[in-house]
Image (tube, grey):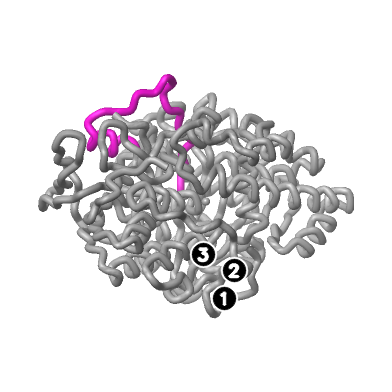
Amino acid sequence: MSRAAPAADHVVVVGAGLAGLAAACHLIGAGRGVTVVERDDAPGGRAGRIRCGDYLFDTGPTVLTMPHLADEAFRAVGTSLREHVELLPLQPAYRARFADGSALDVHTDAQTMEAEVERFAGPREAAGYRELRHWLTRLYQVQMRRFIDTNFDSPWQLLNPDLARLAALGGFGRLAPRIGRHLRDERLRRVFSFQSLYAGVAPGRALAAYAVIAYMDTVAGVWFPRGGMHALPRAMAAAAAAAGAGFRYGSTVVRLERSGHRVTAVVTDRERIPCDAVVLTPDLPVTYRLLGRAPRRAVPLRFSPSAVVLHLGTDRTWPQLAHHTLSFGHAWNQTFDELTRTGRVMTDPSLLVTRATSTDPSLAPAGRHTHYVLAPAPNTVVGPDAAAWGDLAPRYRDHLIDTLEQRGLTGIAGAVEEEFIVTPADWAARGHAAGTPFSAAHTFAQTGPFRPRNLVRGLENAVVAGCGTTPGVGVPTVLISGKLAAARITGTPRPGHRAPVDARPAGSGAATGVPGPLPSSSTTGAAHDGP
């Protein structure tokens, strides 16, 4: 593995999102001094927090899977996730509601889910689910160690026995047909393939290897931190600070000071911070600006679809909602065409509705509820540009409210006490390329060793982390990216990667085994091949 500044004593991490915090923890654990610089007044990055009246809203990811990856960061500084965060397992992980009026609870326990599939679609589909679960598990086992949790120096690293195993599993085929080999019911196929959208590719064109995201959601289990998703970065920052990391909040990095092929200091709008190495976690445009130029690539980067997020604080809720509810419209292929090709907002939206107060009522006043409505949207390259969203946002907000009303959330328009909307224009204003919080799409040419590297060509002591670099988009992979960035400096061998039998913090329920987003910091999105 190639390394950057292995003798670095003091490392500056730019950005206190999940990637930057993971990097900071692993660096401290390896004996390095660390200063974290964050432009906002608190940690979190995309996993931020906003108070609207008496309602508390997570502004970013709402789905937490693979909590043992966060635990690795805590253990690097001598503590554990369970000592800082109470994780509550979600049962069901999701509730899927379909345009024909049917509903399916997605459980991560195999027997419970098999019984639910049989109730929903019959014994043939239940048998197909058993086969699919086995395939998803094998896919994860083959991919994690060699293709996800690894630092690539060359595409030649792909040539290993696991590559043949991945090919034998059909990982280089297309996702939708592969899911269809196990499930005939079109509704079930949606449940196990919609995740590819957050990787930036429609299921019909995505590599089957990306079914590993469905493994994380539907097999490994879904949790919710008490206090909201923002509780995780807040706890990571506290653990890092207790272990000796310095934090500079409310400080914007304006330039990197260099001498030859080395960064010698990070200069903010408040101070100059000398360093032996730097970890950059801002999204692509911010990182490129700090580096002085964009990377050289044969083909320009292609970016994932964006999202509109409608945050609603309401005086009531609706019993058909679970903590996470997938609300599918009639349209499916048309929806992906709109998001990735024609650039139209969804005319028949498929939505993720998260009611965090189902699990943690403290996030709203007594008897009130929060509803986080995520509607995938075209990015600003394919669809409306940032300026167009000024007029489009209120009209699309009304369209989403009408859609929710028609799908059974009767009276939602009159139940809203507090609200705010986030659009691609807001993501763009925070420095996210193409107005998307999901960064570079996971096309074949932007996957694994072909994704922008976490080493910076031409600089000996700069590393990047976040969803734009390896391994990619999502809370689990962003946490891994921070660990991999730290390993580029420390060379610390990573531990063998396995999910613990029980990753629960104390007090949580039975063990059972994400792009979301308000960009609130210069974190979890850096990516480049090097200037």
The range drawn in magenta is 284-309
Camera-nearest residue between 449 and 70: 449
Specify whether 258 is left or right of 329. Answer: left
Query: For numbered disc 3, what is the local secondary structure?
Result: helix
> Residue at the right extreme?
123
Residue lying at 69% horizontally and 40% vertically, measured from the top left: 165
Task: Return the mark for residue 89.
Answer: 2
Rendering quarter of residue 263 = top left
Quick check: is 299 in the magenta stretch? yes
Task: Return the mark for residue 25.
Answer: none
Query: For numbered disc 2, what is the local secondary structure?
Result: strand
Read off the residue under disc 1: 508
Residue lying at 38% horizontally and 29% vertically, measured from the top left: 385
Rendering quarter of residue 239 = bottom left
Camera-nearest residue between 404 and 136: 136
Q: Are marks 2 and 1 in contact (CB under 8 Å)?
A: yes
Query: For numbered disc 1, what is the local secondary structure?
Result: loop
Residue 142 at least partly seen: yes
- Say which amino acid is labelled 1: Ser
Residue 414 at least partly seen: no
Camera-nearest residue between 57 and 165: 165
- Say which amino acid is labelled 3: Ala
Q: Select label 2 or label 3 by which is in front.
A: 2
Q: Select label 1 or label 3 by which is in front.
A: 1
**Label 2 vs 3, first from the N-terminus:** 2
Q: Are marks 2 and 3 in contact (CB under 8 Å)?
A: no
Residue 351, given in percent of the width and then of the height, sits at 57, 47
Quick check: is 195 in the magenta stretch? no
Read off the residue under disc 3: 356
> Residue at the bottom extreme?
507
Q: CA distance from mark 1 to mark 3?
A: 16 Å
- Say which amino acid is labelled 2: Pro
